[in-house]
Amino acid sequence: GAVVSQHPSWVICKSGTSVKIECRSLDFQATTMFWYRQFPKQSLMLMATSNEGSKATYEQGVEKDKFLINHASLTLSTLTVTSAHPEDSSFYICSARQRLAPSTDTQYFGPGTRLTVL
Amino acid sequence: AQSVSQHNHHVILSEAASLELGCNYSYGGTVNLFWYVQYPGQHLQLLLKYFSGDPLVKGIKGFEAEFIKSKFSFNLRKPSVQWSDTAEYFCAVNALYNTDKLIFGTGTRLQVFP
């Protein structure tokens, strides 16, 4: 149980184009999903918290107009990188929060999406 | 601000050696604690978690971790490592007052040689 998928697993795009990444919780409902970036040989950096039915909450320094998040259902969140530039090239990872009981929130992670902007 | 420290950045062991990876956090309140593992080319997987109760937590693949509240630590252990344990290990913490914010350590790269 607690499986999270991401699509696509990798994408190459030209500078200036937009890219959409999907994150799905396959066997549980997630009112909250999270989007992270992982730089080579570094830890995960939280970008934003995606809440079903409401606006995402962005971490300080993350441009909300560049990284559009939509949490359309209890099993799907999307991250759209708008007008992508080479500096946006990175490994994007989503997670979905499973809450089986109060105070027992556990995040399960997707396999990540490697974005390369040429 | 909350932070998580993993002091061992790179650990190299031979098979059958014992493993202990350190994790310390800075937050005085009640926390939930996690260890995740990222095998080469794969995604983050949950190894084990601590919410409350017995401070010695057993996870998958023979791993365990001990929560020592007085030391703000949650060290990961395995009595005998295998080559297949080669991976990146991340400690993560969230405070009960804000379980949305999962704070990760910088990770420890473990290499196990046959």
Image (cartoon, coloured by chain):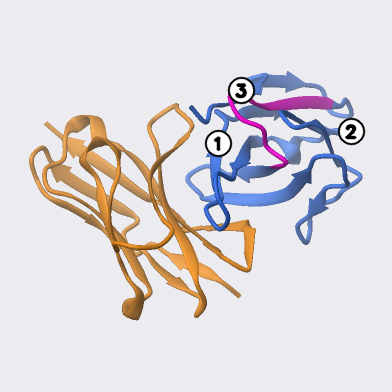
Chain colours: A blue, B orange
Crowding at dot 3, Cα within 10 Å, few <14 / some 14-19 / many 20+, comes out as some
Mark sitting on residue B57: none
Query: Which residue corresponds to mark 1?
Result: A109
Question: On the picture, is A32 further left or further right than B110?
Answer: right
Query: Which residue corresponds to mark 2?
Result: A83
Residue B102 locus on image (x, y percent): 57, 56
Q: Nearer the viewer, residue B7 or A100?
A: A100
Which quarter of the rendering shows the C terminus of chain A?
Answer: top right
Q: Which residue is at a point 63% across and 68% down the rendered structure image?
A: B97
Crowding at dot 2, Cα within 10 Å, few <14 / some 14-19 / many 20+, comes out as some
Query: Which residue corresponds to mark 3?
Result: A26
Q: Which residues are magenta?
A: A19-32
Q: Nearer the viewer, residue A15 or A52?
A: A52
Q: Which residue is at a point 29% across and 38% down the rendered structure image?
A: B60
In the image, is residue A23 above or below residue B74?
above
The CA span between labels 2 and 1 is: 26 Å
Residues at circles 3 and 1 in contact by the CB criterion of under 8 Å: no
In the image, is residue B60 above or below residue A116?
below
Element type where label 2 sits in the image: loop
Amino acid type, callout 3:
Leu
Crowding at dot 1, Cα within 10 Å, few <14 / some 14-19 / many 20+, comes out as many
Is residue B36 in view?
Answer: yes
Q: Is residue A20 magenta?
A: yes
Q: Which residue is at a point 47% across and 58% down the rendered structure image?
A: B105
Amino acid type, callout 2:
Ser
Q: Say whether disc 3 or disc 2 marks the residue closer to the N-terminus.
A: 3
The CA span between labels 3 and 1 is: 12 Å
Q: Say whether disc 3 or disc 1 marks the residue closer to the N-terminus.
A: 3
